[in-house]
Every structure is written in structure tokens, then in C-alpha cells.
Image: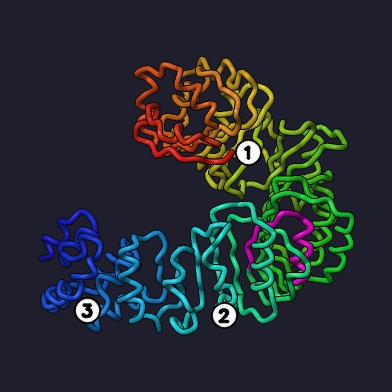
Amino acid sequence: MWTGLWAQSTPYGALVTLYPWFKQPPDWKKLTSTRENDIAQISTLESTLPDELYEFIFLYLKSIDIIYSFFNLNSRFDRLISPFLCAIDLSAIDEHILDGYCQRILPKIRHHVKTIKFDDKNIYRILPLSTAYPNLCSLSITEIPQVNGKYLPYLESFKEVCSLKMYFDNEPCEQKLSNEIFSNLFQPNCQLQTLMIHDIYFTIHAGNIRSCSIKTLKIMLRSQFDLNVLLKNLPSIEFLDVQLRRVIRQQNHQQTYDNIVSLPKLKDFMFFSVFPIDYNSLERLLSRCPNLEYLSLNLDSSQFIDGYSLEAKLLSKLRKLTKFHFCLRIPNVTMINISDYIETYKSSYWLNHPVLCFKIAYRSSHYCIFSLPYPFSYLIFTSNDIVNYRSNISNISMYNRQSRVKEISLYDTVPFTLELFKFIEETFVKTTVLQLYSLPVNILNDDLMNDTAFILENILSLMFQMEKMVDFKYLKRLLLMMPNIVELYMHWNLLVDLKTEDFGQQLQPLLNRIKKVYIADSPVEILEDKSLFPNAKIMRNKL
């Protein structure tokens, strides 16, 4: 038996050898008779195999498959799978399988369930919460549409759980939806301690939010003013992750921040904004967080910031701060040269906290400065000038492997150089996605066009974030330079122009390898034409 078992190539294969019914998704009509026949065989096998082997096999399986295959076989397997009964993931599964779970398994394990995850469209099968799952603590809802979400009638019942995670499928948000969310979940009678809302931006009406007990919050807001309104109603907040969509200029920004007396319990604060914010107001807010231990800032500032001001006005006041990660894009209003600017980051504090600075081209006279190793997954508006960086340490290569950046957007007013791409390859070794924005007519420099031997093997996704046509010779060089691309993003006008070109034997194999193509603002006929990408799934996308 052991020889046959370990001859299988994977633990999954070993499981199929032991239990033939596991090969296919369950046929719920035949479930009872099939399992009764196989249960008779288990008594012999189970005495032979140790618990450790089953625990190893379980690492390779989804919890719903484990429960289906082993639940109610006997007391030993019920004990082995008991940890998996607490967390049930019913998202993104076949409707037939979901029906079987809801009808036959969930009623039997409902007292064990502490966390459950499901798609919004199936919420009526899972709820009500209080009667179905008396020990439920955490709820995750996926694939929520912005309009006509099935979850809306159940918002009141969400107040009963400790943790709620919501995953929307679209970023904008209507005011009506914002009102519904905040008038239900941000209230004194809500038991929520943790709330994570993904991929949708909210505008907060002050009359719809009241002081609540939320301790952990991840949210996306439309403006800095919304953040001000939010924080006045989170006296117990300990962990806060905020992204801003845009900034609304409000004369009462300072007055609103001054109304926030203190956030003494806040220990972790992450803040992201790709549009310029009022940094001085944010600085005043942070000074009211005396117990902050972790601070992460990734933002565009409308004010000039240097190392002296960061240390004196902010960091010196946060005496319990242990980690400070940042990427700041700042206007060089003083017209200080980059070498003199980096000198402001050479105090005793900064020499123990290395940084890198470079000029960015998306606005004139702007610098980007970030802590090392780069702490975020996305580096925006990267230009050729990054190769002429300045740092407060002599050697940045020690941080290359620690960099977290996976996606880089490139923006410049001159052609991208070979030196730039070599720098990306050497410095940001985990990068798999490149975005190209607002390119010049000649997007690649001659040195890159002539050095056909240079390739970027790690890049898996290439995104053209513009509508205008890219000369075919540059597109060809980009694709040959990134031979492992499996995802491509472009505007439909660019795709139509490409259809007139002869790709030849050198390029066509690369196009055949692409698995997903996202076309912005595409007519239906474009989505149905697979002549260029015969093996790809072609989908509509927005730039």
C-alpha cells in the first residue's frame, strides 16, 4: 500500500487512490449511496495511515473539498477536519456544488462555522446569519456590483458580526450607496470591530455617520475632506488603511482637522493618494496620534517636504513610531538641485533610514523620494531620470532583493532608454507588470532598439495606458524584449492598427502565448476577433 501511495506524483493523487469518489466534483444525487459503499473500505485504510499524512494532503486541498470528502465518515476524520469547519469559502464555485453544500452540508456544520465567504449573488442561500450560524464572527462577500447588490437588504444583519470584508467589482460609487453603507455600518449600535471594503470609493455625508466602535478599517475615499469626517467618528480606531481617489478643495480642511482632538488608540496608519493632497493638514492630523507605531505614506503633496521638516515637524512628535515607510512625490518649489536636496536626509536619524530620490517628468520640477527598500507594490510615474538617482547611502544594491515593487508605470517626455530598463531589471527584481503612459512619438531610444539581445524575462503583463498609435517597430521591440508576457492591455484603436501589420514568424509565437487581452472601450466585434491572439481570452477594460 505504501509503495502504491507514494508512487503518486502529488498528495492529491494519493488522495484519489485512497478515495475514488474524490476524482470529480460531487454528484449530490448519488452522494449518499456512493459514500456508504466507500465508508465500508475506510475502516481498513484509516488504521494504516497516520494523521500526519492526512494533514499533509490537506495542505493541497480547498476546505470545501476536504469537508465534502471526509465529513461524517467517522469520528477520527471528523476530528482531523474540525479546523476546516470553522472557515468556509463558497465563493467562485460551481452552482451545482453550491446547491449541494447549502442543502446537505451547511445545516450539519452550522454550529462550527465562524467565518464564511461567498459571492454577492448567492447571499440569499447563505443567510440569515443569526439563526443559521450562531457562532459566526466573520463574513466576506465577493463580486459585489455597485448597482443592485444583493447584500443591501441584509446590511442591518451585518451589524451582528465582528468582522466584515466586502469586495466590489467597480471603483466609482453613487451617493445613495455611500449613504446606505455609512448609515448602517458606521453607527453606535453596530458590533463591527473590523471592516475591509475593497475596490469602491465613497463620499461621506456627515449626517449619515456617527461615532462607532470600529477598530480596524480599510476603505477608499473620494477626498481628503471625507477622511476628516470619517476620523471624527472613529474614537476606537487602531488600524487604518485609506486610499484617496481625488482631492476636493475645501476651505474648512484645517478647521475640521482641529476638531479631531486625538486618536490615542491608532497604532497602524497607511495612507495612499495619487493626486496632490494638503500635506500640512495631514501632518497636523498625525501629530494627534501619539501612540502611532507604524506609518506608511504613499502620496502626492501640494507642499514642499524635505528631510529636515519630516524629522522636526512629524517624526520627532511620534515617539512610539518603530516603522516609517514612505514614497513622496513633491513639488520642488524652492528649485533646490537634487544633490542639495538629498543632503537634508543625512542627519543621524536619516543615516539609519536610507532613502532614494529622483526627478519625475509627469510634472515639471518634481521629485520622488522613497524609503529603502521600496515598501510598496506599485511605483508610479517612473522616468528615465531614475538612473540618475541620489541616495543618502553609497550602495543601494543591498536592498534590491528586498524591494516589494511588482508594478511600475513609466512616464516621460523623451524616449525610454536601455539604461532605464536595465536599472529596472537590476533594482526592482520582483517587477512583473509594466505600464506605459502618454508616450512620445518615438517611445524607445536608439540604444534600446539596437541592442536586440536585451530582454526582461520577469515581465508578465504589459499595459499601454493611452489611445494613440504606437509605431509598430516599437511595439515589436517591446514584445520581443518581454518574451514571457501573458497579459496585454491596450486601447481598441491601437489593436485595430495592429491588425494591418505583418507580425511574421518571429513575433507570432509570442502573441500565441498571450492568455488574456484587455481592450479599453472596445466595440463588441473587436472582442470577438481572435485573429491576433488565437489563444487569449479577450475582455473589455477601461483605461
Query: Which residue lies at the image location 13% right of the left edge and 64% below the top edge?
Result: 2
Query: Between marks 1 and 3, how big is the CA–CA gap?
Result: 61 Å
Determine whether the residue tagged by mark 2 lies in a helix, strand or loop.
Answer: loop
Which marked residue is nearer to the observer: mark 1 or mark 3? 3
Residue 158 placement (x, y as % from top left):
56, 75
Residue under label 1: 395
Residue 445 placement (x, y as % from top left):
59, 18
Q: Which mark is residue 447?
A: none
Residue 437 placement (x, y as % from top left):
62, 32
Query: Between marks 2 and 3, how big is the CA–CA gap?
Result: 33 Å
Q: Which mark is residue 160?
A: 2
Q: Determine crowd level at label 1: few under 14, some 14-19, many 20+ residues with C-alpha closer than 10 A.
A: few
Q: Earlier in the sequence, mark 1 or mark 3?
A: 3
Which marked residue is nearer to the observer: mark 2 or mark 3? 2
* Range covered by the magenta-colored residues: 217-233
Residue under label 3: 73
Q: Of residues 273 and 309, which is closer to you in this image?
A: 273
Quadrant in the rendering for residue 90: bottom left
Tell me if 79 is positioned left or right of 257 in this view.
left
Q: Determine crowd level at label 3: few under 14, some 14-19, many 20+ residues with C-alpha closer than 10 A.
A: some
Instruction: Kindly identify the amino acid type of the residue bearing the numbered disc 1.
Output: Asn
Residue 352 placement (x, y as % from top left):
70, 51
Quadrant in the rendering for residue 211: bottom right
Q: Earlier in the sequence, mark 2 or mark 3?
A: 3
